[in-house]
Amino acid sequence: MPAPKGRREDNRKPRRENGSRTDARWGGGKPASNPTGKPTGKPKGKPTRTRSAGPAPASPKPAAKFIATPKPAPRTSHPDATPKVLTPPPTVPLPPPPDFVAQCSAIGVEFEPGDVEKLGLYLARMLHANEAFNLTAIRDANDAWRKHIFDSLTLLAPLSELAEGATLIDVGSGGGLPGVPIAICMPHLKITLLEATGKKVEFLRSVADALGLRNMTVVHDRAEALGHNRGVKTGQADGSNIRVGAHRESYDAVTARAVGRLATLAELTVPFAKVGGLVLLIKGEQADAELAEAAKALHLLKATHVTTLPTPTGRTVVLTKSSATPKDYPRRDGEPKRSPLGVVGSAEPGQRD
């Protein structure tokens, strides 16, 4: 009998008390008419899904707490290391060894009044500054008088023929050797000290002020760069141009004291000398071997070996400049030391103290 119009047959399945279906097709209980418990056919229509309440809302996280921590102390080279505080420089000269003046006289060096005292004050200030930064490996005062001052004064004899007002540049002056002793004992020369390290430049300038060396100027630069400095052209009233402030090929004499092997040293010094100027290099017992090694470098730089002078502390190589140095020299920073001109092979030897 068909269902009355306006009503439909209620084919919905009974539900459990918790609201889920009991039909086996939906994972519920078995229908009463199917004792086997197996589904009897394909379910019709779409299954009705029960909406879940979803996961519980996450509880808000507590705000992060930031705890300020003290900054670590700056690192030092050693846990117990403390920065050195340099006391004021000395004002009392170091006395020379008893035989110092006699030894100088034996090589033809005679002092004007006050020269020895200035040399002693310079040496005192150098050893004092050496406590804060490296200027020399020599700590003993008597050794310093002989190995620094006396060694530098051996250049006075070959420089004695320079005229009043002649110019000299000391390349790689370091702590001021041999430039400062020459400036003290030869005040008629105009001395330029060339140094690349800032602390050493400051020290040298303080020495010039303390000793009143008005004939001495300190330049902070590298020899590779300054050796190309031709100055600035300035116009004259007669229409000609002259260069002012030049360093390349501008000095009557150039000195250097064992800042490298001779091939390297020649490239760093010869460009500063005028044509016909002197280049004096203080070397050790290996001077002859270094000269042979540097033969090609001297040829390229247009320099000629004049003589090698034996001294009580070493040997002095004397060069002269026969013509203008080619514009390619000196090469860029560090190149003359890394690859000595005309030399193949061995690394740069260590410097003297």
Image: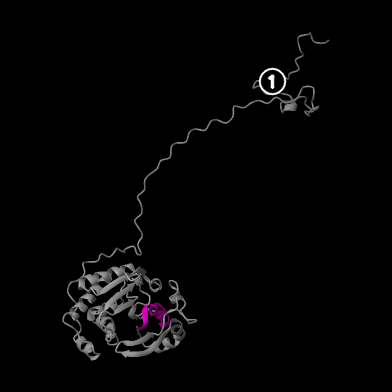
Residue type highlighted by circle 1: Arg
**337 vs 235, nearest the viewer:** 235
In depth, the one of 274 and 353 nearer the eye is 274
Magenta-drawn stretch contains 324: no
**Where, by quadrant of the figure, is residue 168 drawn?**
bottom left
Residue 271 lies within the magenta run: yes
In depth, the one of 319 and 352 nearer the eye is: 319
Residue 330 point in image, percent of width and height:
43, 75
Which residue is pictured at 23% across the width and 87% down the height? 109
Q: Which residue is mark 1?
A: 15
**Residue 285 shown left or right of residue 88 in the figure:** right
Secondary structure mostly seen in magenta is helix
Identify the magenta region: 261-277
| Place of residue 115 in the rendered image (x, y in percent of width and height, measured from the top left) | 19, 80
Residue situated furthest front in the rendering: 238
- The image quarter in which residue 254 lies: bottom left
